[in-house]
Image (tube, rainbow, N blue to C red):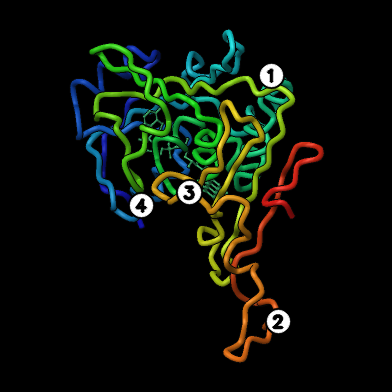
Amino acid sequence: MIPVGFEYARPDSVDAALALLAEHGEDAVVLAGGHSLLPVMKLRLAAPELVIDIGKLAELQYVRVEGEEIAIGAGTRHRTLEASEVLAAECPLLAAVAHSVGDPQVRHRGTLGGSLAHADPASDLPAGVLALGGTVVLRSPRGERRVPVTEFYTGVFSTVKEPDELVVEVRVPRTGTAGWAYEKFTRRASTGPSSRWPWSTAGSGSSTWGRPRCGPGRPRPRSRAAPRSRRPRRSPTGTPSPPRTSRGPRSTVATSPGCSPGGR
Ligand SMILES: Cc1cc2nc3c(=O)[nH]c(=O)nc-3n(C[C@H](O)[C@H](O)[C@H](O)COP(=O)(O)OP(=O)(O)OC[C@H]3O[C@@H](n4cnc5c(N)ncnc54)[C@H](O)[C@@H]3O)c2cc1C
């Protein structure tokens, strides 16, 4: 489908983007990588009057160590996270989660801020940032506020972000060599490309910052329990049924050395 007509603006700074957001309020929408927004507009589930393109703002694209945290600009592409030497040394879980997103084309367009703001429960990066206990930095003409990611999501496709606010940064702890694991479930029974998006869980081995997490709007997974589809199914007579082969989720797993998700 073709989106409803809209005006397009490409501000040259974050301040200029914020001024446009303040002026147009709910009639405006921010475009970062566009990989989630454009399908929504094509389906006419969103019909903004103004699209504000922040995809080329260099001031939103960085990965750097700041004290005990890593500060990541909201406009940083998944590919940059995947290849970041800073993340490889200081927070390898997030690099592995970025690597699991879609395909190279998606990873070269999609941004961390866009993925978090979109709040799709099937997305990978929100699950990773939730597991890490990260922080979302929001800015508006009224100032800046830091929201723990555990308080950022209010439900499926829903966050505490106000219409005039921009996600400008995401902060995660430096986990160093702490153990971690990330498991991504794919619904095999469905067919089209978009229906192959994952169900996500992420966990880490540190008692100070990590805990198992699903994406936004989803309940926490049961700790150390195999997913339902993997448990041996029993017939009414109590005989274990053969494992499902053609239906139900399959999963891919990434872990730090020596880590085994769910004790498997
Ligand atoms: C074929 C395909 C496969 C995919 N596979 C996966 C996958 O396996 N795993 C996965 O997690 N994701 C997947 N995605 C989604 C992809 O990661 C998206 O890029 C991501 O969800 C959204 O990021 P974006 O930068 O494209 O955001 P956009 O589409 O530009 O924006 C999404 C929403 O966030 C808002 N927004 C964007 N940036 C900001 C900001 N800085 N501040 C405030 N609001 C903002 C926009 O207004 C919009 O409402 C896939 C997408 C496609 C097209």
Q: Sequence-wise, which precedes: disc 3 or disc 4?
A: 4
| Amino acid type of the residue tagged 2 in the rendering | Pro
Nearer the observer: mark 2 or 4; the answer is 2
Secondary structure state at the residue bearing disc 2: loop
| Mark number, residue 10 | none
State yes or no: discs 3 and 4 in contact (Cβ < 8 Å).
no
- CA gap between label 3 and label 4 equals 32 Å
Q: Whole-Å distance between the Cαs marked 4 and 1? A: 37 Å
Amino acid residing under circle 3: Arg
Separation (CA) of disc 2 from disc 1: 45 Å
Image side of residue 84 versus residue 212, left or right: right
Please say if 55 is above or below 44. Answer: above
Assign a secondary structure to mark 4: helix
Instruction: Give the mark nearer the N terminus: 4 vs 1.
Output: 4
> Which residue is found at the position 51% from the left and 16% from the top?
58
Q: Which residue is mark 1?
A: 86
Front label number (2 vs 1): 2
Given residues 9 and 190, the one toward you in this image is 190
Per the image, the residue denoted by label 4 is 42
Residue 55: image location, x then y, percent: 46, 27
**Picture coordinates of residue 60 (x, y %)?**
48, 18
Residue hosting label 2? 242
| Earlier-in-chain disc, 2 versus 4 | 4
Q: N-terminal of the two: label 2 or label 1? A: 1
Residue 198, image quadrant? bottom right
Name the quarter where the N terminus is drawn. Answer: bottom left
Residue at the extreme right = 258
User: Nearest the camera: 76 or 89?
Assistant: 89
Which residue does the numbered mark 3 point to in the structure image?
A: 220
**Residue 248 coordinates in the image, percent (x, y):** 59, 70
The reply to whether the residue tagged 2 has its Cβ within 8 angstroms of ligand 1 is: no
